[in-house]
Image: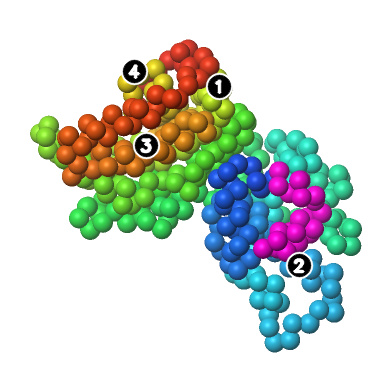
Amino acid sequence: MNNVYNNTIEVLGMTQEEFDSIVFRDEETERKVVECLDFCFANVKKLENMACILLQYIAQRHMELKLNSDPSDKCGDIDKSEKYGIIDASGDDTRDDANNAVAYAIAKNKGIDTEGMSPKEVWKAINEKGGVPNKSGKAEKPAPKEKEAKRGNEKAPRKIVSATAAEKDHIIGERFSKEAQKKYDEIRGKEKQITQDCVSLAEATGMEMSGLEFSVKTGSSVADKIERKRKDEREHGLNSSDEEIVADMWDLVRYTGMAKHEELADKTQDVMKKFSEMGYVVVECDNKYMKKGATYKGIHLAIKSPEGQMFEFQIHSPESLRIKNINHKLYEESRNVNTSPERQAYLEREMSKNTESLAMPKNIEKLKSFKKGR
């Protein structure tokens, strides 16, 4: 493990501190990277987030540079990729995406402003600052393929891994209509572009994205929500179709942006302004900090994309996200259709107690909740 870690740093020509500053940005990323260092060299297809893409690139470059620097190396009948613990079944497109991803990370580390730059331009700027040296000391880097940006004149999108949970669990179930499954799949198809824009927005506003693997509700979660909606409608004499229920799930696509706790209100204002500049419409702002006796605190935005797709954008701090995670199991139990009213009341009291210790962010009272027509 330590040998792999040291080799990747050596190949990139960085110090340990420089490498850590790129991949160990927060506890969640650090956890992912530690896992990836363990298995990414065994199967580069297992990409969980940007850290894995970075390590995939590092693994590929490690193999290439290792072999280039040691031409006398002989592997006998064993494939060289097997010798170095790398199974590269990803193809050129994935390698280009990995190259592009690491370009922006290295540029940031070198203090290069990449705003509006294509991957090719980023690599050029990196080379002008000394490049990424191989073991012979020479800067060497293949020019990555450029991809067309889909929002105005923005830079070409990087490879962002998201919605992996829904990729593994994307079947609603046979007890629901085929139209509902079709609608769910249609919405899933719109997520990638929205994710690209949300990541760009987070970078522009000085925030971090969290939990991109859950950017789309899983099929089983959608099925549970349809069941709850059916029960609620029966009690009120309503009868929406499964497809209508899925289409009305404005949080089927959802994101979490992270900021410092004291900056939550100001960052929310920045986010709403940036969304508007990008052609999105902020339909609703729900400031749950101003709700007395609330069992949950956070800031939720309901957003409509330029293509008309609704989605949710939550804004949290590490403190508020910690409380949310503590209360999550209690919340899941309380909304289960089989939970008794007495048990639900108890769980709500427990969640309220857990939120009491959360401080009120600066200027949070100035952030007014609102709701527009969709």
Marked residue nearer the N-terminal end (1 or 2): 2
At label 1, the amino acid type is Glu
Marked residue nearer the N-terminal end (3 or 4): 4
Q: Give the overall secondary structure of the magenta segment.
A: helix
Which residue corresponds to the image point at 69% horizontal and 50% vertical from the top-left? 102
**Position of residue 3 in the picture relative to residue 210 (left or right):** right
At label 2, the amino acid type is Glu
Question: Farthest bottom residue?
Answer: 77
Q: Where residue 256 sits: x, y (%)?
A: 48, 36
Residue wearing tag 1? 262
| Residue 339 seen in render | yes
Which residue corresponds to the image point at 58% horizontal and 47% vertical from the top-left? 29
Which is closer to the viewer, label 2 or label 3?
A: 3
User: Which structural element holds mark 4?
Assistant: loop
Quadrant of residue 47 in the image?
bottom right
Marks 1,2: beta carbons within 8 A: no
At label 3, the amino acid type is Asn
Q: Residues within 10 Å of mark 4 (few under 14, many from 20)?
A: few
Nearest the eye: 92 or 18: 18
Quadrant of residue 294 in the image?
top left
Q: Is residue 180 above or below residue 290?
A: below
Residue wearing tag 2? 64
Residue wearing tag 4? 292
Which is closer to the viewer, label 1 or label 3?
A: 3
Q: Is residue 71 above or below residue 314?
A: below
Which is closer to the viewer, label 1 or label 2?
A: 1
Marks 1,4: beta carbons within 8 A: no
Q: Is residue 325 above or below residue 361?
A: below
Within the magenta stretch, is there residue 53? no
The magenta-colored residue range is 1-21
